[in-house]
């Protein structure tokens, strides 16, 4: 997505414990995770702009992480079936001593999903590295999503419009 927005970048995976600290709201949890990832690259931020992000899926104030098994993925998708949930992304931009924290919240509503639809998705796609066990840009998004209120790209995992707007500030300095 960043490439499509005309940005040059290098991907550097962050090795961070993604467990959520107790007592944090979902937005605070996303911010905390994005910030923990960013802190891993404090040295690189002296000469490069660092962008880190974390996306959470929240239903009934319960954060759905990444499933660890087919059964967990099936349970998450069954929970989301026929309901609305929030997708929250926090993005931290760090350059030298400056930081910006951006947040985006989108509301996604799924059609009711049959057991067969859920099973097909779990067996033929990869729900394990995705919060809430789904990627909207995959088959489940095409056949299962009834509506989105907010940024589609936030649901994919990065609110590119907010990032590009924030990066403009760094070009001017």
Image (spheres, rainbow, N blue to C red):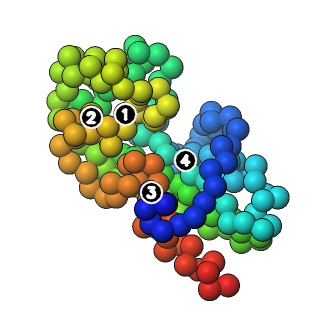
Closest to the observer, 159 or 27:
159
- Asked whether the beta carbons under mark 3 and mark 2 sit within 8 Å of each other, the answer is no
Task: Locate the C terminus by quadrant.
Answer: bottom right
> What is the distance, in whole Å, between disc 3 and disc 2 at their CAs?
19 Å
Closest to the observer, 146 or 83:
146
Question: Which tag, 2 or 1, sits closer to the chain's start?
Answer: 1
Mark 1 sits on what residue? 134
- Note whether residue 85 is visible: no
User: Residue 111: horizontal and vertical position, in percent?
Assistant: 17, 35
172 relative to 40 in the view: left or right = left
- Asked whether the beta carbons under mark 4 and mark 2 sit within 8 Å of each other, the answer is no
SS at circle 3: loop
Instruction: Pick out the residue farthest to the bottom.
Output: 172
Question: Which tag, 4 or 3, sits closer to the chain's start?
Answer: 3
Q: Which mark is residue 1?
A: 3
Numbered disc in front, either 2 or 1: 2
User: Residue 29: horizontal and vertical position, in percent?
Assistant: 57, 45
Q: Which mark is residue 51?
A: none
Q: Residues within 10 Å of mark 3 (few under 14, many from 20)?
A: few
Numbered disc in front, either 4 or 3: 3
SS at circle 1: loop
> What is the distance, in whole Å, between disc 1 and disc 4 at their CAs?
15 Å
Q: Which mark is residue 139?
A: 2
> What is the distance, in whole Å, between disc 1 and disc 3 at their CAs?
18 Å
Question: Which tag, 3 or 2, sits closer to the chain's start?
Answer: 3
């Amino acid at each position: 997505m960043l490439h499509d927005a005309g940005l040059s970048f290098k991907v550097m995976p962050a090795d961070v414990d993604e467990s959520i600290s107790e007592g944090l709201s979902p937005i605070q949890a996303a911010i905390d995770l994005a910030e923990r990832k960013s802190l891993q690259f404090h040295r690189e931020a002296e000469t490069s702009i660092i962008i880190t992000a974390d996306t959470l899926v929240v239903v009934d104030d319960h954060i759905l992480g990444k499933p660890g098994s087919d059964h967990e993925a099936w349970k998450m998708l069954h929970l989301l079936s026929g309901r609305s949930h929030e997708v929250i992304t926090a993005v931290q931009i760090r350059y030298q001593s400056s930081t910006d924290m951006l947040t985006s919240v989108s509301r996604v509503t799924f059609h009711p999903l049959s057991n067969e639809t859920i099973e097909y998705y779990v067996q033929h796609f990869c729900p394990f590295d995705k919060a809430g066990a789904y990627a909207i840009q995959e088959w489940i998004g095409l056949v299962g999503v009834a509506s989105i209120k907010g940024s589609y790209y936030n649901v994919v995992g990065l609110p590119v419009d907010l990032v590009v707007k924030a990066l403009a500030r760094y070009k001017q300095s």
